[in-house]
Amino acid sequence: MTEDAAQQTLAEDAVPDVPPSEKSGARRSIMWLQAIAFVLGLGLLVYVIRRVGIQPIFDALGRIGLGFFVILAINGLRHVFRTMAMSLSVAPEHRDFNFRHAFAVRLGGEAISFLTFTGPVLGEATKVALLRRRVPLAHGVAALVVDNILYNLSVGVFILSGACVMLAAYDLPAVVSYVLLVIAGSAALGVLAVVFAAQRRVMLLTWIIDRLGAWGLHPKVLTSRRDQVYALEAKVYDFYTHRRGAFFAMLAINFVAHASSVLEVYITLRMLGYRAEVQAAYVIESLTKVINFVFGFVPGTIGVYEGGTEIVLRTLGYAAATGVTLALVRKAGTVFWTVIGLFILAWRTVPHGARHLTDRSPRLRKIMDSLVFSNMMHRPARTLVSVLGIAVGVLLIVFTVGLAHGVLRERGRREASIGAEIMMRASGTIGFTGDQPFTLPASRAAEVARVEGVRAAVPIGQNIVKSDKGFGQRLVEG
């Protein structure tokens, strides 16, 4: 059997032999669960914002201003590092793609992961589908599994170190300390389990399938694909055995990606006006990864990410509004790159789907022959660039108008309660001492205080005219 035939067989085997009614029922259940999780998360987000207050959040967002584009660039830098790691997971002899294509594949897969209930499962399947024309299917699946395992291994180490830093550097309540100990213990067990499995070549999924069979459970979806699962696990362990340099390079790149996320948190806190410490940014990023891992089934982690970040920052001594603002700013960056990923998916899939439909329907083909639809179908890249240009223009207009509105509102709020401190001196005087000293009597302050609109009048300096200990000047206030 040729390699192409083997890949085709594997691709066909990857689709479970399930009746259509069961498929549609499972799909409806997943959609309902996704909708419920999204609604609950949205309700939590509304509750958090109402409890914190809208005005403090707007004030904090106004302080960031155009700095949001810096945050956006750092957020994109993390995708660059993750793309580099993903590219290394594919063997050089099968790596028939460039960085631009790999970056598009990553953004498309991450968009699906961010927006759907199934999270990484469907997102990784999307990446496999986008790579299948450049990488053999069997090698592409194994490479993405390796990429995910190594990334999650680096996340476990990162979470473990962040929990330890927080326990060592901060004076925490007992409850928080216990929670951190549980998080650190779970992360340590996960890392040790991966190391143990790599050293002993433990075929975990194959072992689970065999155990289910021994207990009398024979799910057809699993038992019919035991050999494929075993071959996939063997390829994963072969990666560690035969490509150890790429293994450690991917780990290093993943840690650099985590460092860029820490930098994003640090710069955002500085833009919000706080003298942030690197260890605080490190702890915040490590603990928010716990939130993303636990609540990955919530589409967009809406609500839970904002509420969790608020709790983390309040524990570290920051204001609640700061935590919500930090989460919203970072979520906005994620949404931006998600939209780019959706455009990429549309660019890759819509032309092929439209061409397939027009081939089936002569009437639809006639409609598509119009100038606009023909341009969309035959020049998807140009159409995408045009749409992106218009979208960016609209976003810039909305952002500029919103920023101007916020600045004017803040200026009006400040001018409504404007105050001034005025220092008064006699005409011709220039200082406390010298040829032309201040000559106003200190008692004149009481007269100034009676002027309408003056809240207080206080002498800031006083010449000592007569004293039993000598003479000179005395600073009263200021």
Image (cartoon, rainbow, N blue to C red):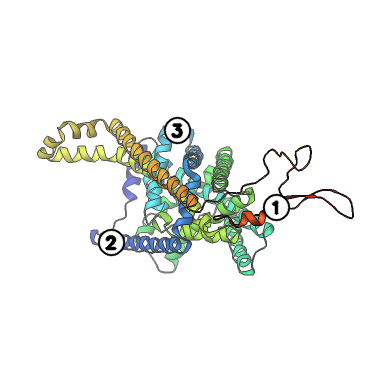
Q: Earlier in the sequence, mark 2 or mark 3?
A: 2
Q: Are the residues at dot 2 and dot 3 in contact (C-beta closer than 8 Å)?
A: no
SS at mark 3 in the image: helix
Locate residue 394: give its quadrant: top left
Q: Is residue 328 left or right of residue 350?
A: right
CA separation in Å, label 3 and label 1: 70 Å
**Helix, strand or loop under label 2:** helix
Please give the residue where the numbered disc 3 appears in the rendered image: 99
Q: Name the residue under label 1.
A: 459
Residue found 40% across the figure and 69% down from its top: 216
Give, as a three-letter code, the residue at label 2.
Arg
Residue at image point 50% right, 60% down:
308
Of the pair 428 and 389, the residue shown nearer to us: 428
Name the one closer to the observer, 214 or 280. 280
Mark 1 neighbour class, 10 Å CA radius: few under 14, some 14 to 19, many 20 or more = some
Residue 407 pos. (x, y %): 45, 45
- Residue that label 2 marks: 28
Q: Which one is in front, 443 or 416? A: 443
